[in-house]
Image (cartoon, coloured by chain):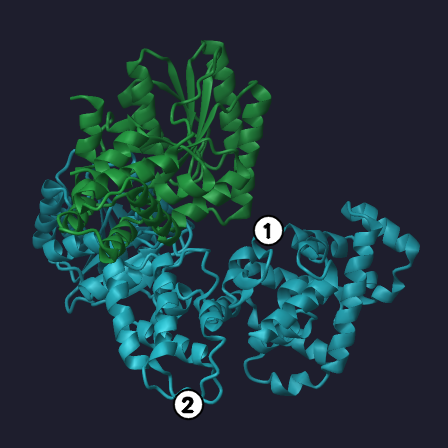
Chain colours: A green, B cyan
Amino acid sequence: MGLFDRFKKGLEKSRTGLWGRLSGIFSRSRLDESAFEEMEEALLAADVGVDTSVWLVEQVRRLAREQRVDQPSELPRLLAQAMASAFEGLDSSMHLATSGPTVVLVVGVNGVGKTTTIAKLAHFYRRQGKQVLLAAGDTFRAAAIDQLLTWGQRVGCDVIRHRPGADAAAVLYDALQAAQARGADMVLCDTAGRLHNKAPLMAELSKMYKVAQRELPGAPHEVLLVVDGTTGQNALNQARTFREAVQVTGIAVTKLDGTAKGGVILPIVRELRIPVKWVGLGEKMDDLEPFDPAAFSQAICEP
Amino acid sequence: MLEGLSSSLQKALGRLRSKGKLTEEDVAAAMREIRLALLAADVNVKVVRDFVEKVRERAIGQEVQKSLTPGQQVVKIVYDELTSLMGGSQERLRMAAKPPTVVMLVGLQGAGKTTTAAKLALSFRRHQHRPLLVAADVYRPAAIQQLKVLGEQIEVPVFELGTQADPVRIARDSLQEAGRQGADVVILDTAGRLHIDEALMDELARMRDAVEPQEILLVVDAMTGQDAVNVAQSFHERLGLTGVILTKLDGDTRGGAALSIRAVTGCPIKFVGTGEKVEPLEPFHPDRLASRILGMGDVLSLIERAQQAVDEEKARDLEARLRRNEFTLEDFREMLGQVRNMGPLDQLLRLIPGVQRIKGIENIDWDDKRFRRIEAIILSMTPEERAHPELMNASRRRRVAQGSGVTVREVNQVLNQFDQMRQMMKRLGGLGRFAGRRSAMQAMKALGGGLPGGLPGGLPGLGPDLGSLPGGAGGSGGRRHHKKKKRR
C-alpha cells in the first residue's frame, strides 16, 4: 500500500465525517451564503476552532471570487487550497544530524501517546537500518519506564534508564554519553507528561533541553510536541506554553484513526507556525506516517 | 482568546442602555458571543446550536433585574441554563445491595483510566470501604505494572492475572477474589480502546455481562474536543453508561466536552479528577463547571481548597493574635505556608474570577519560589527579630540578606510590606468579632482581602515581578489589580 493510500485510509473516518457534512453543501445547485455558513460549521465540528474556521471560509470566499467559481462542487478543491496555504513555508521533514547521533526530545501533556509515538519512531528508523537508543525520561509516572522497556524489546533497541523518581536530565545525559560511545544514530528521549500550566515541570523540560545542547553541539535536533488528535482548542494553549519552555520544532498528532478529525492542528500551524511532522493512525508499530500537508488537505476535503 | 464570557457580553451589550425588558435585538447580539464562548470551550457545535436557541427563547422579554446590566442578565440566564443542563445537583454512585459493588471504568486510550482507578479506590478507602483494584488492561505495555505501583502507594490490593489472560476471565475471577478478601468494592481498570473498534467494544460488553457492574463510568479527558460526543454516544449505546468521570480538569482546561456529553447521552458527570498525584476524586459540581466553561472563575473550589489546606486550630490562634495586634513575622511565615499548601499559585489564581482578564497576567511567572524566598529571609532572623521586626537595623538586615542569599533591598521589601500589613491590621482591629464561627476562612479572607490589592498583588516580595502590569512594581501594581476587580 502506498504512503498516500495508507494515510488516506487512516483518515477515512475523518474524511467521511467532514465530507459527509460538506457533501450536502457541495451537491447544491448554487453557491450562496448558507453554503459558506455550513462550511464554517463543518470546520468547527472538526475542531478547527473559531478563528481559523472563519479565516478558512474567508480564504475560500476570496478564492471563489478570484477564480469565478459558482459551482458548490468546486468548494472541496478551494478548501484544500486554502488549507494548503496555511501549511505553506513550513518544512515537515525531520532534521537529522549530519554526523553523530540525532537527538529527539518528545514532549506533551499526559496521555497523548508520547511513549507509543517514541516506539513507532524507533521502529520507523530501525527499518531504515539505523541504530536507535531510547531514553526513559519519564521518571515520574508509575511504570512509565517499564512501558518503554517493553517497547524497546519489541522494536529491538536498548533503553537507557534510571530508577523511578530520578532526575530526567540525568537520564538524558547518560543516554547521550551512551549514544556517542556506541555510535548510535538516533536518541529518542521520552519525557513525563505534564500539564502545560505547571511551572516547575516546564522548568525541568528546559533543563533537559539545556543538557542536550551542552553535551552535543546541535542537539536536540528535534523537539516533537505530541498532540492528541481528539483534543479540542486546549491544544493551542499546550503548543503555546511548551514552545515557551523549549524550542518545539514539530508536532506529532496522534489517535487520528478514530472519528476525531484532528482539525486543531490547523490553528496551531496557522497561528504558531509549527510544522506537523508525524501522524499516528493506529496502535500498531508501523501506524506512524510522516505528515504530508498536501495529502492531509486533500484527503480531508476531497470526495 | 476568550477572556470570560461576561466581559465580552458586556462589551457587546455595553451600548445598550435598555431598562426593563430584554429586547430581541439585545438577545441577538448576546447570542453570537455566547456561541463563540461555548465553541471556544469545545462544546459540540450541535449542542451549542440547541443551547443557544433555548437561551434565546428564555431570554427574550425577560425583565432585567435592577442590579444587573442587560449583559449580566443574559450571562445569568446562560449560567442557570448551563447548570440545569448539567444535571443541577451532584450525583452519587450506586452501591450494590449485596456487596461487592462493581465499578467498571471504560474509555479511549490516554483518558486517564488507570490513574482514575487508583483515585477512585482511594476515595472509597477514605469512606471506610475495602476496595479491590482489578488490572484488566492486558494490552498496553506495563499497564498492569502501573496499577500495581499505584495500588501499593495507596495500600489497596490489586488483582491481576498477567497479560496473557482474557479480560473477561480476569473480571469474573476478580469477584471471587473480592469475596475471598472481603472487599466490598471492585474497580475494573479496562484497556483504552477506540469506540469504533468492534472487537474490543464487544469484549467490554462481555465483561459487563460477566460481572453485572452497578456502575459503568466513561473516563473522559476534559480537553477532548468535538469528538467527545461521538465517543460518549458509542460507548453509551454499546454498554449503557451510568456516568462520566472528567479527568485532567486542571488549569486552563475549560471542559466544554462535559456539557456535550451530558447533553447527548444524558449521563451525569459523577467525579472530576485533577493532577497525576493519587488524591481522592472530587465530586462534580455542575454550577462550578458552568462558571468554568463561561470563563467566570471558580471561587467555590478555591474556598474549598482553602478549607482543606488551612489548619483550623492554627488559624484560630493566628486570628486571636491578629486581634491583639501581636502578629509577628513568624506568624506571617506560617500564613504563607498555608497559602502554599493550597496548591500551585498559578492554579489558584485561575480559579479567581476576573484574574484572567488582567492584562499581562499570562506573562507573570507565578512560581512558588518567591514564597520560599520570603520564607528563607524570615528563617534567617533570630526568634527575637521575628517577634520584634523593629529590631532590624542596618547591620542585622545585612546579616539576614547574607544568610538567606538575597539582597538587602529584598529584605527591606519584606519588612516594609510586613509593616504595612500590620498597620492595616490595626485599622481592621475589630474584625475579630465578625470572624467568630468559621474562623479559618474568615481569617484567610481578612488577610487576603485586607492587603492592598488582595492576595496576589499584596504579598510582599511578589512585587518586582508585577512590574509588567500597568502601574509599575510592587504595591501600586497590587492596587491596580484591586481597582480592576472592583470595576467588574
Q: Residue at x 66, y 77 (%)?
A: B319
**Residue B229 visible from this viewpoint:** yes
| Front position in the image: B479 or B158 | B479
Tag on residue B482? none
Q: Position of residue B1 (x, y in %)?
A: 46, 56
Q: Position of residue B134 (x, y in %)?
A: 23, 48
**Residue B186 visible from this viewpoint:** no
Mark 2 and mark 1: span between their CA atoms? 41 Å
Q: Residue tagged by mark 2?
A: B20
Q: Is residue B204 above or below residue B433?
A: above
> What amino acid type is highlighted by mark number 1?
Asn
Q: Residue tagged by mark 1?
A: B363
In primary-sequence order, the first of circles 2 and 1 is: 2
Q: Secondary structure at mark 2?
A: loop
Q: Position of residue A10 (x, y in %)?
A: 20, 34
Q: Is residue B16 above or below residue B297?
A: below
Are tags 2 and 1 found on a single chain?
yes
| Front position in the image: B317 or A269 | A269
Q: Residue at x 33, y 24 (%)?
A: A121
Q: Is residue B453 above or below residue B274?
A: below
Q: Position of residue A208 (x, y in %)?
A: 53, 31
